[in-house]
Every structure is written in C-alpha cells, then in structure tokens.
Amino acid sequence: MKTPAIALLLIGLFAPIAQAAEVEFVTCDNGLRCFRPPCPSRDTVLLPSGRRLAKTEPDLSRLTEAQRRQLLVGRSGQGSALYEGTTVLAGALEEGPSARLVASGIVRPATKAESQLCRRRR
C-alpha cells in the first residue's frame, strides 16, 4: 500500500511546474453585481483567440499608479477601461483549476473588433 503513495508523491515532486504564459487581453463587464466584496464582476478575453476566462480579475499590482489611474478613466473618459474592453493589457497567465492573470503593462488601445469580443457571450 505504501508504494502507490510514494509513487504519487514522486510524480508530484518531479512533475513540470506550470509556467506562466505571456498573453495580451482585455477585461469586460460580465453583468454580475454584488452587495459586498469579493465580486468577480469582470471577465477576461484573451487576444487574439477570443477565449473568455469567466469571472477572472487580473492582478494589477505590477502596474504603476499612473497606469492604474489610466485604466480607471478609460479611453472614453466616461468609465473604466477594465469594464469596457477598450485597453489591451499584457500579462502572465497561470493556467490551473482557477486561472490567475497578472497584468504587467498597458499595450495599446483596443481595436473595435477586440472591444466587441466583450459583448459576445460564449
């Protein structure tokens, strides 16, 4: 009985460690509203594939204060770029049971086609 447990332990120790993949993405309002945090009210759409990561908030801690302010104002000056899908961000995606996305910078304004990916539900 000890052999299978040891084998599983060894597999776990020597299995390849998940690497974070560099990706570009936009974040979108998913319509979810909450009364108190945490509130996963954003989806992330990977570019150019259009793959949607539901209820995935990017970690913005690596962005500068100026970059975070820019995201709050958005391109239109009316609302947050994090809800409108108007700004393309770069970051590291760690796949797993719950995907983790860490933003590392602002790349550029999103094209109209990229912003429209936010409106498309899968």
Image: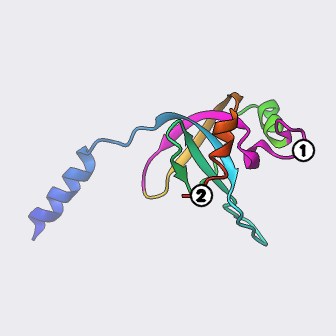
- Residue 71 % position (x, y): 78, 39
| The quadrant where residue 4 appears | bottom left
| Identity, as a three-letter code, of the amino acid under mark 1 | Gln
Q: Indicate which disc, 1 or 2, sits on the residue closer to the N terminus.
A: 1
Residue 62 in view, yes or no: no
Point 75% across, 49% down: residue: 83
- Region of the chain picked out in magenta, as a range: 73-96
Point 62% across, 37% down: residue: 103
- Residue 11 % position (x, y): 21, 51
Q: Is residue 37 magenta?
A: no
Distance from Cα at disc 1 to Cα at disc 2: 24 Å
Question: In which quadrant will I find the N terminus?
Answer: bottom left
| The quadrant where residue 85 appears | top right
Determine whether 43 is above or below 61 in the image: below
Choose between 120 and 41: the one closer to the eye: 120
Say which element carries label 1: loop
- Residue 82 % position (x, y): 74, 45
Point 72% across, 36% down: residue: 87
Q: Is residue 89 magenta?
A: yes
Mark 2, residue position:
121
- The outermost residue toward the top is 108
Residue 74 in view, yes or no: yes
Say which element carries label 2: loop
Determine whether 61 is above or below 11 in the image: above
Mark 1, residue position:
78
At label 2, counting other C-alpha atoms closer than 10 Å, the crowd grade (few under 14, some 14-19, many 20 or more) is few
Question: In which quadrant will I find the C terminus?
Answer: bottom right
At label 1, counting other C-alpha atoms closer than 10 Å, the crowd grade (few under 14, some 14-19, many 20 or more) is few
- Type of colouring: rainbow
Nearer to us of marks 1 and 2 is 2
- Residue 120 % position (x, y): 61, 53
Point 82% across, 42% down: residue: 72
